[in-house]
Image (cartoon, helix red, strand yellow):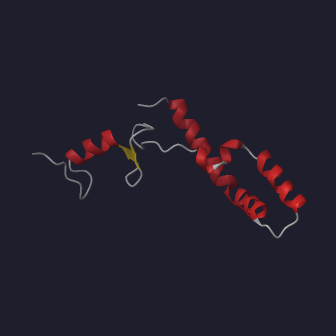
């Protein structure tokens, strides 16, 4: 089980990403628009830098929904390899069969 503080921190990051997503996208579009004057694009760059760092999408860590484990994460099922194997062996994941030979 992962540290509760790490799990909570990641949940807060997800909330900040959702809150600032539209504003960040607008600023990034302004920065990338080459038809705008340089000073306007530079102001947008400064405004983007002033935003909270945790509002960036790439700061969110994918974690297992069950344990909070950050590594060996399967995106499609939102769980770690350990619980994927356990749930698959118990027949709790439709279409997944643990191979044995």
Q: Residue furthest bottom?
A: 35
Q: Name the residue rendered at 80%, 53% in the picture.
A: 45
The correct choice, above or below, for 62 with respect to 23 in the image is above
Quarter of the rendering occupied by the C terminus: top left
Q: Name the residue rendered at 48%, 45% in the picture.
A: 62
Q: Name the residue rendered at 66%, 43% in the picture.
A: 54
Quarter of the rendering occupied by the N terminus: top left
The image position of residue 87, as x and y in percent, is 26, 45
Observer-nearest of 86 and 31:
31
The image position of residue 96, as x and y in percent, is 23, 54
Q: Name the residue rendered at 77%, 60% in the picture.
A: 31
> How many numbered marks, from 0 up?
0
Q: Viewed as shown, does residue 12 lie left or right of 89?
A: right
Observer-nearest of 38 and 56:
38
Observer-nearest of 11 and 84:
84
The image position of residue 8, as x and y in percent, is 55, 36
Q: Viewed as shown, does residue 95 lie left or right of 35?
A: left
Q: Viewed as shown, does residue 4 lie left or right of 94?
A: right
Q: Viewed as shown, does residue 79 lie left or right of 87?
A: right
The image position of residue 67, as x and y in percent, is 40, 37
């Amino acid at each position: 089980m992962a540290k509760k503080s790490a799990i909570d921190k990641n949940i807060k990051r997800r909330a900040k990403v959702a809150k600032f997503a539209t504003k960040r996208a607008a600023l990034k579009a302004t920065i990338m628009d080459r038809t705008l004057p340089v000073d306007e694009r530079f102001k947008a760059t400064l405004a983007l830098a002033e935003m909270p760092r945790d509002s960036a999408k790439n700061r969110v860590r994918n974690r297992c929904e069950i344990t909070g484990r950050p590594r060996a994460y399967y995106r499609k099922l939102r769980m770690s390899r350990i619980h994927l194997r356990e749930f698959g062996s118990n027949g709790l994941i439709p279409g997944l069969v643990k191979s044995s030979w």
